[in-house]
Amino acid sequence: MSKAKLKIKRDDQVIVIAGKDKGKTGRVTKVYPQKSRVIVEGINVVKRHRKPTQMSEGGIVEKEMPLHVSNVMYYDADAGKGCRIGFKIEDGKKVRYCKQTGKVID
């Protein structure tokens, strides 16, 4: 499986466009390019039952599960909605930009 080129990076603000958390926004905490998945803070939270060990106590633990990158979209705070991302060369550097507004992201 080859490494996919993702347009979403860590610390990006994204909006969920499909699934049980549709419409919620959050910050990307981890990116898995090999699997085309991202973990978003506070989104897709599940409960896991943990068995007690010598290191940690047991109980019900909530954790965030990965979402497929096609189910999230970069969130433009100025426009208040999601936007598609493109790449362009600016001053000899490759930068990401919002296709609707033309604003450079990084």
Image (cartoon, helix red, strand yellow):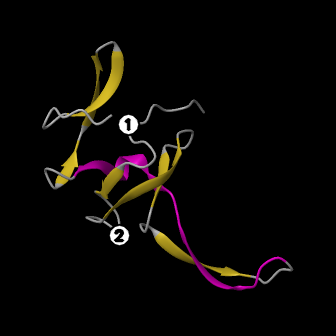
Q: Position of residue 14 (x, y in %)?
A: 32, 53
Say which element carries label 1: loop
42 up-or-down from 96: above or below: below
Picture residue at 34% right of the left edge, 68% below the top: 21
The label shown at residue 38 is: none
Q: Nearer the viewer, mark 1 or mark 2?
A: 1
Question: Residue under circle 1?
Answer: 7
41 displayed left or right of 65: left
The residue lying toward the viewer, choosing from 18 and 83, is: 83
Q: Is residue 50 left or right of residue 5?
A: right
Q: Residue at x 38, y 36 (%)?
A: 7
Q: Nearer the viewer, residue 84 or 92?
A: 92
**The magenta segment:** 55-76
Q: Which residue is mark 2?
A: 20
Image quadrant in which the N terminus is located:
top right
Up-down relation of residue 45 to residue 49 (above or below): above
